[in-house]
Image: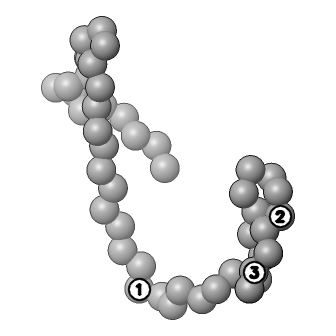
Amino acid sequence: MTAANAAWNGTLAAGASVDIGFNGSHSGTNTAPAAFSLNGQACSVS
């Protein structure tokens, strides 16, 4: 995913902050993973 500014709001003042949102949908099934990792370290699935 890539986020970019809109033409009308491309500049933030020094010390300012911004919040972004994300809306998504998924029409398939959500099955448990067989394996996964976090920060390059393998995690167990139980």
- Category of crowding for the residue at label 3, using alpha-carbon neighbours closer than 10 angstroms: few (below 14), some (14–19), many (at least 20): few
Q: Earlier in the sequence, mark 1 or mark 2?
A: 1
Helix, strand or loop at label 1? It is loop
Q: Which of 26/35 is in front?
A: 35
- Category of crowding for the residue at label 1, using alpha-carbon neighbours closer than 10 angstroms: few (below 14), some (14–19), many (at least 20): few
Q: Describe residue 5's horizontal placement relative to residue 31 as left or right.
A: left
- Using the numbered discs, state the Cα–Cα distance from disc 1 to disc 2 in whole angstroms: 28 Å
Mark 1 — residue?
A: 27
Mark 2 — residue?
A: 42
Give the total number of marks visible in the rendering. 3
In the image as oriented, which residue stretches furthest toward the left?
A: 8
Residue visible at 28% across and 31% down?
18
- Using the numbered discs, state the Cα–Cα distance from disc 1 to disc 3 in whole angstroms: 24 Å
Helix, strand or loop at label 2? It is strand
Q: Which of 10/30 is in front?
A: 30
Q: Describe residue 7's horizontal placement relative to residue 40 as left or right.
A: left
Mark 3 — residue?
A: 45
Residue visible at 51% across and 90% down?
29
Give coordinates of residue 4: x percent, y percent.
36, 35
Residue visible at 82% across and 57% down?
41
Q: Describe residue 21's horizontal placement relative to residue 2 as left or right.
A: left
The three-letter amino acid code for the residue at tag 2 is Ala
The three-letter amino acid code for the residue at tag 3 is Val
Q: Where's the C terminus, which quadrant?
A: bottom right
Closer to the eye: label 1 or 2? 2
Q: Is residue 34 above or below residue 20?
A: below
Badge 2 vs badge 3, beta-carbon distance below 8 Å: no
Closer to the eye: label 1 or 3? 3
- Using the numbered discs, state the Cα–Cα distance from disc 2 to disc 3 in whole angstroms: 10 Å
- Category of crowding for the residue at label 2, using alpha-carbon neighbours closer than 10 angstroms: few (below 14), some (14–19), many (at least 20): few
Badge 1 vs badge 2, beta-carbon distance below 8 Å: no
Give coordinates of residue 36: x percent, y percent.
74, 69
